[in-house]
Amino acid sequence: MKITRQDLITLCDNFLTDKIDKTILQNFATDFIISDERDFETDEILSDTLFEWEDEDLNFPINHINVRLWKERLLTGVDKLLYYNDWNSHIDEQQAICSKYNSKWAPINKKLWVAISTNIDTDPINGLRHPRDTGTTGWFIWTGDYSQAEDFFQPICAEHLLQQRPEIIKYLGLEIGFRFLSDKKGYEDVWYDEKIKNV
């Protein structure tokens, strides 16, 4: 059974265009792994991808975001899967941001809520950390013009930001009272706002 990267890229494309579902990827990987006649050149990226597809419970969920990342890794060798899936891979960046802006590192519980606007795919993105209520992190994150409307913010579990805007996870260890403004092009402004702490 000969498999190439292009075989896996084709499967990724079929998944991303909804021609197949994740069970096809899982079954393909399982069939290869248990085959007595498996054959591929020594290729860690190819073999890692197959083993990750074979058991998503131990690895990464098979969804559109991650399949795009697998395809990118197969094409370029660049691996961003941890960045989009593993909260702990952002801890060093959080600590560096806190040090850079003179904040204690005050990590949040990734299972608690952050409040986000509905359009956080756009730029720039704003965040501020209020004193937290029970079950929340205290973080409010939005893009575009701020609104006082009751439905402007919606609660989501903090760890879900990993797949939506992983580049902002590094700010979420800042203390209560801190704000940030950033964009995907690398702009960054972080500052302390005493008024927030006293809300």
Image: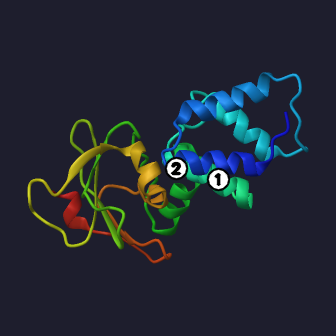
- View extreme (front): residue: 19
For marks 2 and 1, the one nearer the N-term is 2
Residue at the spot 42% in from the left edge and 43% down from the top edge: 159
Q: Is residue 69 left or right of residue 184?
A: right
Are the residues tagged 2 and 1 within 8 Å (C-beta)? yes
Q: What is the secondary structure assignment of the residue under circle 1?
A: helix
Q: Residue furthest left?
A: 149
Give the residue displayed 19% in from the left and 54% down from the top: 153
Which colour style is shown?
A: rainbow
Q: Is residue 171 left or right of residue 157?
A: right
Along the line of sight, the residue nearer the viewer: 28 or 19: 19
Quadrant of the image containing the C terminus = bottom left
Asked which quadrant contains residue 172, the reply is bottom left
Which residue occupies 74% across, 57% down? Answer: 77
Which residue was labeled with disc 1?
A: 71
What amino acid is at disc 2? Leu
Q: Is residue 71 above or below residue 191?
A: above
Q: Nearer the viewer, mark 2 or mark 1?
A: 2
Write down the residue under mark 2.
16
Q: Position of residue 104 (x, y in %)?
A: 44, 55
Q: Camera-side residue: 110 or 57?
A: 57
> Which structural element holds mark 2?
helix
Report the Cα–Cα distance between label 2 and label 1. 10 Å
